[in-house]
Image (tube, helix red, strand yellow):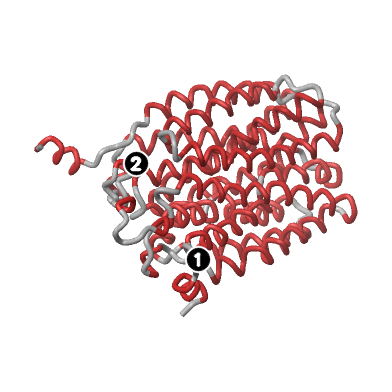
Amino acid sequence: MRVGNRLARRAPFYYGWVILFAAGSSMFARNAAASLTLAVFIYPMTQDLGWSRTLIAGAAGAGGLAATGASPVVGWLSDRYGVRLVLLASILILGFSTISLGWATVPIAFYIAYGAGRVMFASPIQIGASVVVSRWFVRLRGRASGLLGLFHSAGMVLFPLIAGLVIQSSGYRSAWVVLGVIVLAVALGPVTLLIIQRPEDVGLRPDGDKADDQAYDPTDATQRTAEGTWTLREAMRTPALWMLALGTGILFLLQSGINIHQAAYFRDQGLGATIAATSLSLNAIFLGIGSVAWGWLLDKIHVRIVLAGVALLMAVTSGLFATADSVAEALLYASLFGFSLGGLIIVPPVVFANYFGRGSLGSIRGVTEPFTSLGQAIGAVLSGAIFDITGSYSIAFTTYAVLGTMTIVLILAARPPRRPADVESAAAT
């Protein structure tokens, strides 16, 4: 019997919180390939290697494109063989690919190494961690997902900070090696030893409910979910699935298009390296604060309304970025954008889980996640291309504000679907 199974049966508290910690360790570690981390490397790499910003950011785009093809397979593997296997392989690939970036001196080597890590970031770790938490929590899904976002936020703060410190002392090549070692040291043990696919596998129920707890009843309307009833085929026939997937993908286009270029943009504005680095830290800190706040809202307000609120804040702050030319504005807008990203990280996984249940959640996320990966890929390259052509990011940020506003309408139109059998049953009565 594995360590996790023994702990689950003997723990004096609900083992779902251990699952949250183990999944959170992978969310923390995935920031080795995050856009904010890459943002720290763009300036020194362009200076040392003579590469354009579009070329460097293109590695994130290439990884995102590859992730669009990987996500359906990852989703199927998560349901068929379990999240533990998916996360274990992902951490190993991410750790060693990050380490290898220390020796990447030509674009093709950089694209292969960083692209591999970016695939792990964008697909298996994102899907695996959020799916396993959604399976262990139903009533508490919003706040549990918010706490999961805190792990990601901590990684967003620490990975760029550590990278910046190592770059200053030993250069950016050493920084890549250090980040890769951290990935393996932090996440490999927890995902290997502690992850269990679902609470029922060890005789438990979601949220730690007892067998006679009315709150566990999957037909309870207060849970706002047809728990475990939707198959992948059924979900794919609903307009809501594709509307939510498209809306989420557009929002991640905004996220990538701004985050990757944020530090370089503020340096172009004459605000200096210190302010640029501080803005990244505030972005990450407020992502953590936002994760908890949006998670709390998810347990109080319909998930569709919460996601629309995330889109509204992202649209507004995207437009504000185009006007930032002072220290106060840079730090304020970075904080607001980070707060909105806290919602972007945790709200969509909860929306899909609440709309379609736990049964085939991995496979369902597998077919929707390519929209996220594609959005991130487009945003990373689009901002760099616009800068290289116009010498400014203003057009990019203004475009993102318009796209974010349009996405609000799309999300609000994605009403919760009803299975055909449920519609027939309602009509019969």
Within-10-Å neighbours for mark 2: few <14, some 14–19, many 20+: many
Q: Could you say which is closer to the camera, residue 243 or residue 56? A: 243
Within-10-Å neighbours for mark 1: few <14, some 14–19, many 20+: many
**Residue carrying label 2:** 224
The C terminus sits in image quarter:
top left
Does 160 sit above or below residue 10?
Answer: above
Name the residue rendered at 50%, 47% in the picture.
68
54 with respect to 64 (left or right): right
Q: Could you say which is closer to the camera, residue 205 or residue 427? A: 205
The spot of residue 159 in percent (x, y) is 73, 51
| Residue 285 marker | none
The spot of residue 283 in percent (x, y) is 69, 37
Name the residue rendered at 41%, 47% in the picture.
367
Q: Could you say which is closer to the camera, residue 156 or residue 236? A: 156
Does 269 sit above or below residue 15?
Answer: above
Alpha carbon of mark 2 to alpha carbon of mark 1: how far?
26 Å
Name the residue rendered at 77%, 44% in the picture.
40
Q: Earlier in the sequence, mark 2 or mark 1?
A: 1
- Asked which quadrant contains residue 57, the reply is top right
> Hey, which residue is sitting farthest right in the picture?
169
Q: Could you say which is closer to the camera, residue 324 or residue 390? A: 324
> Hey, which residue is sitting farthest bottom in the picture?
1
The spot of residue 428 in percent (x, y) is 9, 38
Does 429 sit above or below residue 25?
Answer: above
Tag 1, which secondary structure?
A: loop
The spot of residue 406 in percent (x, y) is 49, 22
Tag 2, which secondary structure?
A: loop
**Residue carrying label 1:** 195
Name the residue rendered at 40%, 43% in the picture.
352
Q: Amino acid at mark 1?
A: Ile
Q: Amino acid at mark 2?
A: Arg
Q: Say which of marks 2 and 1 sits in front.
A: 2
